[in-house]
């Protein structure tokens, strides 16, 4: 009863079934999703140049040799706001002597502006390899080799937006680079399905969503789409990417964040736009962008076979279930490679595809015991149990936070529980470090 008025209160009850998780929330247990081999080796953060002298302006680069190793450089703000137009020195693969012989003017720049800072650093590797980046990222370079473009997203951003970058552009550590160049891939990642997944799995930094390649990309199960469905998704994604770039190129005052701020309000049915938002809506043709995204979302849902207008929570529950199906599938040796030409180049079907001038269809299942992607051991045949593999040992970290992080990472990557002995087998070190395992 409502005190003082004697009137009854209308009470609505809602029921939600499902497990209760560590945060006391109920619903899809996205934390249970496991990384998929089908996504292996394709996504990584960018490079870490380390040192103000590594990043240069076009005017600075005019001092160097015409063929000096200089590349366009992007960080998260370049994607969400406006590109700074800066370049980065990238001497990857060259010794200091080779840099001095081939590019003496560039070498002097590094000698004057980078080496003094590196000499004062306590990290021996940084001091001794002062002409190279702190993180050169061999995996990224290997994955991007031969691609004309790749997909990138800012690791921390208000809106989860994916876009194509030319392969000549080097991403920094605050970007997640995904070595897929097909519009179909961009479309699936840009859809409501994947955005809902990434928001649920990636966490936040302050009030901004974080995209973690290991949590958001690696476990995400792509749909098994027909060629016609792939073509539809590919066409819409290419239109979205081209539309945004065309609008930003035409209007210096527009930003990607600004476009999606307005798109979000319009999508929520809020028509009370400010004068600035109305200008963005008009110049950025946001209504066109919204229509393209709506059509893309419908096309991706169709590719999954979900025609019942699922809610975001239902989408997450279905993705968790689909992830479990794929994990079981992969345990039997059937892998739906996202990029078989790179991930499984020696598989029989890939070889046949190469002879025909075409690789496997995107996401096609392959029962293979070939190496999944460069530098990874082959999978066992489906008829044989997987042999136990000796873990790659790493140095036991010195600090407690690093120790906890290292153990948590191994547990997250393990398909089953680990005993203390199994955990210890992943590390090496001096002293009584095993007794300090968390």
Image (cartoon, rainbow, N blue to C red):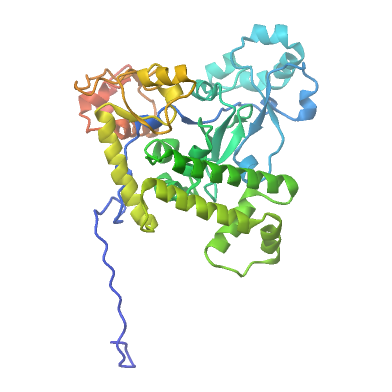
At which x and y percent is residue 92? Answer: 60, 17
- Where on the picture, by quarter, is residue 215? top left
Depicted 379 relative to depicted 231: above or below: above
Residue at 72% across, 44% down: 249
At which x and y percent is residue 122? Answer: 55, 21
Residue at 34% across, 46% down: 319
Q: Nearer the viewer, residue 32 or 438?
A: 32
345 relative to 92 in the view: left or right: left
Q: Visible in this render: residue 174?
A: no
Residue at 27% across, 40% down: 324
84 relative to 306 in the view: left or right: right
Residue at 61% across, 26% down: 49
Q: Visible in this render: residue 235?
A: yes
- Where on the picture, by quarter, is residue 428? top left
| Quarter of the rendering occupied by the C terminus | top left
- Where on the picture, by quarter, is residue 420? top left
230 relative to 172 in the view: left or right: left
At which x and y percent is residue 333? Answer: 27, 26
Depicted 276 relative to depicted 32: above or below: below
Q: Nearer the viewer, residue 407 or 245?
A: 245
Spot the residue most to the bottom. Answer: 5
185 relative to 334 in the view: left or right: right
């Amino acid at each position: 009863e409502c005190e003082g008025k004697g009137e009854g209160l209308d009470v609505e009850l809602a029921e939600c079934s499902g497990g209760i998780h560590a945060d006391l929330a109920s619903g899809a247990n996205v934390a249970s999703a496991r990384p998929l081999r089908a996504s292996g080796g394709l996504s990584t953060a960018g490079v870490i140049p380390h040192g103000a002298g590594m990043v240069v302006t076009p005017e600075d680069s005019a001092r160097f040799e015409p063929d000096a190793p200089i590349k366009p450089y992007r960080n998260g703000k370049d994607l969400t706001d406006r590109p700074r137009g800066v370049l980065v020195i990238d001497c990857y693969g060259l010794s200091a002597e080779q840099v001095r012989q081939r590019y003496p003017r560039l070498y002097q720049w590094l000698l004057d502006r980078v080496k003094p800072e590196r000499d004062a650093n306590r990290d021996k590797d940084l001091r001794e390899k002062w002409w190279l980046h702190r993180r050169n990222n061999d995996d990224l370079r290997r994955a991007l080799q031969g691609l004309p473009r790749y997909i990138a997203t800012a690791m921390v951003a208000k809106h989860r937006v994916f876009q194509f970058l030319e392969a000549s552009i080097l991403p920094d550590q605050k970007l997640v680079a995904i070595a897929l160049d097909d519009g179909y891939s961009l479309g699936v990642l840009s859809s409501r399905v994947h955005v809902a997944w990434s928001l649920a799995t990636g966490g936040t930094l302050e009030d901004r969503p974080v995209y973690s390649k290991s949590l958001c990309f690696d476990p995400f199960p792509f749909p098994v789409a027909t060629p016609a469905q792939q073509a539809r998704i590919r066409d819409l994604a290419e239109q979205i990417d081209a539309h945004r770039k065309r609008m930003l190129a035409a209007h210096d005052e527009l930003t990607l964040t600004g476009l999606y701020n307005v798109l979000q309000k319009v999508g929520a049915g809020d028509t009370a736009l400010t004068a600035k938002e109305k200008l963005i809506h008009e110049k950025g043709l946001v209504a066109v962008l919204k229509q393209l995204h709506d059509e893309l979302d419908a096309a991706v849902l169709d590719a999954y076979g979900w025609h019942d207008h699922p809610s975001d929570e239902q989408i997450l529950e279905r993705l968790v279930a689909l992830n479990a199906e794929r994990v079981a599938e992969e345990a039997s040796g059937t892998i739906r490679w996202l990029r078989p030409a790179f991930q499984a180049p020696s598989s029989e079907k890939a070889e046949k595809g190469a002879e025909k001038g075409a690789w496997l269809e995107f996401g096609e299942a392959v029962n293979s015991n070939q190496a999944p992607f460069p530098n990874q051991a082959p999978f066992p045949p489906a008829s044989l149990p997987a042999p136990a593999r000796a873990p790659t040992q790493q140095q036991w970290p010195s600090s407690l936070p690093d120790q906890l992080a290292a153990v948590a990472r191994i547990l997250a990557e393990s398909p089953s529980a680990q005993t203390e002995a199994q955990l210890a087998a992943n590390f090496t070190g001096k002293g009584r470090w095993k007794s300090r395992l968390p």
